[in-house]
Image (spheres, rainbow, N blue to C red):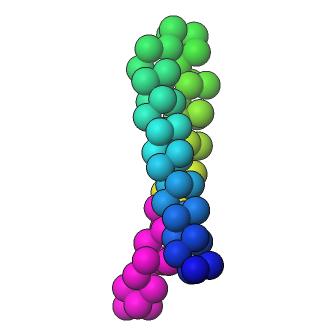
Amino acid sequence: MFIKDRAHDLWDAWAFAAMESEMALRAWLQAAHALKASAFATYRAALDREEQAAAALAARLAPEAQAA
């Protein structure tokens, strides 16, 4: 039961990170010129968090694939 819950938690973490990066992308694209650099940095940070969440989920769902 714990293993299933862990995968579910990792899925949720990835889904939230994906939504956050999508919102950050929209904010960057719509930002005023003076705010573009800051908005881009926020977007890159959100992408990094999504990537980390995706890697954690992948490692949990297919641990043998990570070893290859």
The residue located at (50%, 14%) in the rendering is 31
Up-down relation of residue 7 to residue 36 (above or below): below
- Looking at the rendered image, the quarter that the C terminus falls into is bottom left
Of all residues, the one furthest to the front in this rendering is 1
Up-down relation of residue 22 to residue 12 (above or below): above
Q: Is residue 5 visible?
A: yes
**Residue range highlighted in magenta:** 54-68
Magenta span: predominant SS is helix
Using the image as rendered, state which of residue 29 and residue 21 is in the foreground: 21
User: Which image quadrant is residue 46 in?
Assistant: top right
Q: Can residue 48 be seen in this view?
A: no
Up-down relation of residue 54 to residue 61 (above or below): above
The residue located at (62%, 78%) in the rendering is 2
Using the image as rendered, state which of residue 16 and residue 47 is in the foreground: 16
Up-down relation of residue 2 to residue 16 (above or below): below
Using the image as rendered, state which of residue 31 and residue 61 is in the foreground: 61
The residue located at (52%, 64%) in the rendering is 8
Q: Where is residue 34 in the image (x, y as percent from the top left)?
A: 57, 10
The residue located at (51%, 30%) in the rendering is 24
- Looking at the rendered image, the quarter that the N terminus falls into is bottom right
Q: Position of residue 40 (x, y in %)?
A: 52, 30
* Number of numbered tags placed on the structure image: 0
Residue 16 shown in magenta: no
Left or right, 48 with reference to 18: right
Q: Where is residue 44 in the image (x, y as percent from the top left)?
A: 53, 41
Q: Position of residue 12 (x, y in %)?
A: 53, 54
Using the image as rendered, state which of residue 2 and residue 12 is in the foreground: 2
Residue 64 shown in magenta: yes
Left or right, 45 with reference to 47: right
